[in-house]
Image (cartoon, coloured by chain):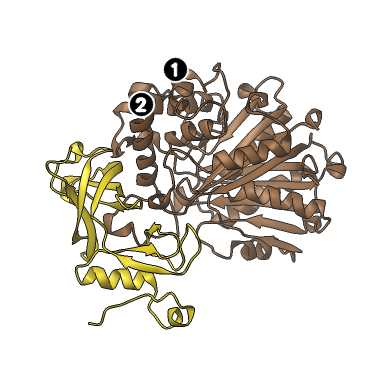
Amino acid sequence: MSLRGKAAIVGAALAGCGEAHGKSAMEITVEAVHGALADAVVSLGDVDAIATCQPLDMLSGLTLAQELGLNPKFTMNNRTGGSSFLSHTLWAAMLLELRLADTVLICYGSNQRTASGKLMTALGLPTYEAPYKPMFPLSSYALAADRHMTQFGTTREQLADVAVAARAWAQKNPEAFIRDPLTREDVIASRLVSDPLRVRDCCLVTDGGGALVMRRAETAKDHPRPPVYLLGGGEGTTHRDISEVPDLTVTGAAQSGATAMKMAGVKPADIDVVQLYDAFTINVILFLEDLGFCKKGEGGAFVENGGIAPGGHLPVNTNGGGLSCVHPGMYGIFTLVEAVRQLRGDAGDRQIDGAELAMAHGNGGVLSSQVTNILGTESTL
Amino acid sequence: MAAITLDSEMTDMKNSPGPDAVFAAKLAEGVFEIQKCGACGAHVFHPRVICPTCGSADLGWVAPTARGTIYARTVVRRKPERGGDYNVVLVDLEEGVRMMSRVDGITHDEIAAGLKVRASIGEGADGGPAVVFRPERGAS
């Protein structure tokens, strides 16, 4: 039995992206939920399974049920970090296919920018890292970037080009938080934070929320918008703490991507548009390699000189990504919402013509959890 | 104080301090030791209850050679008035385990992957004992 094409996203919405003054994380979440239910034309009372993961509320699934006034059959609160939501879609597809639930809601929200101005997390430094005071999570990604540069000759300029491409996409997205021009030189001149990563290698700190409604494929066309089918999904977890990573240059995306693409019956060259969890510029290079868009060690060359920018050889992070569009602490759900928009043809100036097959890829922890989803239009079933 | 041992018998394991506590107690005594699996021979760090290579609970403590090689390095940039820059590294010990640490006695910019280093016990950010490294002088 395969889950390929058995479930579909029938509603999607964002809320509170950028700055949402005076709102709590859960209020932003519920605004997104309201939007997604309206998009799907689904009644709140029809929701019988929910999924969320919020950084500061360990029991956020219960909080969500309470806020929505629901008594769900399933409350999913699995916590793999920012990748959680791409895992939730897989669990949703399982519940739907087994007919244990009929309508699944997946959502997230954070007010971290207006509430604190920085990443809000309940996580402390690991026991065997705390004595050395790495910046959390930035130094972990800096170590990965340092190793990639050492081992493969990846350059400072190539890292910068990831941020430059994200900004170029953001300039086509009226919802993106930062749309000013950004050059390679700007990135390299920005403040050094944890070598080799500079401020412009780092994602934004914004508020924002997103929500999705999933239903079985057989009922997906009962909703007004074109369904976006989940064709494949896969996960990989290689470690929790960066000091325990088996190989700093190979992430669990190698496993999650292969699993997802096998289930979907597709290969990287088939994918029309890619949404990657770009908390830091090095992520994109690592994931493009591990997901098979280029060979290991060649990610730097792949992104160089506009390779993933508008007009490049692969459209990556068409909303502007976490680097330039939105990043409220956990970015995973935004990869899914942008994939949905592209596959519905709703992406405005940044629309990829004829996009039928999308990849959304989430990262959790410090390159620790990797979860890949393959999504497609009806034509891909 | 009495030597702390982690017996492989599960009954004894229940009555012994966990490996984190054993490691910390040794470090407080000025001793840096890592675990070695009696079943498969793999060295283990961080300290664990069972061997992540083979699953055996037969983990004993051994003194590493203290020699290692820098795997990756970063420098956290901080204003001088807030204490200045400091380095954070991942070190591969000769025994095949990796750990996070810091390299003292060398400028940050001289630290790079491949640098040979030697462990000693220094002070961590919290003021407690921590394994730190210095360049292995004369190493090729």
Q: Residues within 10 Å of mark 2 (few under 14, many from 20)?
A: some
User: Could you say which is closer to the camera, residue A140 or residue A327?
Assistant: A140
SS class of the residue under badge 2?
loop
Residue A144 located left or right of residue A165: left
User: Could you say which is closer to the camera, residue B32 or residue A270?
Assistant: B32
Q: Residue B139 location, x and y as percent? A: 16, 41
Q: Is residue A334 visible?
A: no
Chain in brown colour: A
Q: Residue A140 location, x and y as percent? A: 38, 46
Chain in yellow colour: B
With respect to residue A180, does B111 lie above or below?
below
Chain letter, disc 1 residue: A
Q: Which residue is mark 1?
A: A305
Q: Residues within 10 Å of mark 1 (few under 14, many from 20)?
A: some
With respect to residue A187, does A20 lie above or below?
below
Q: Is residue A343 visible?
A: yes
User: Could you say which is closer to the camera, residue A271 or residue B62?
Assistant: B62
SS class of the residue under badge 1?
helix
Q: Residue B96 location, x and y as percent? A: 35, 50
- C-alpha span from label 1 to label 2: 16 Å
Name the image quarter holding the C terminus of chain A: top right
Residue A178 located left or right of residue B66: right
Residue A85 located left or right of residue B111: right
Do pointers 1 and 2 mark residues of a single chain? yes
Q: Residue A117 location, x and y as percent? A: 40, 49
Residue at the location (70% across, 36% down)? Answer: A375
With respect to residue B103, does B140 lie above or below?
above
Residue at the location (29% across, 38% down)? Answer: A195
Q: Which residue is mark 2?
A: A153
Chain letter, disc 2 residue: A
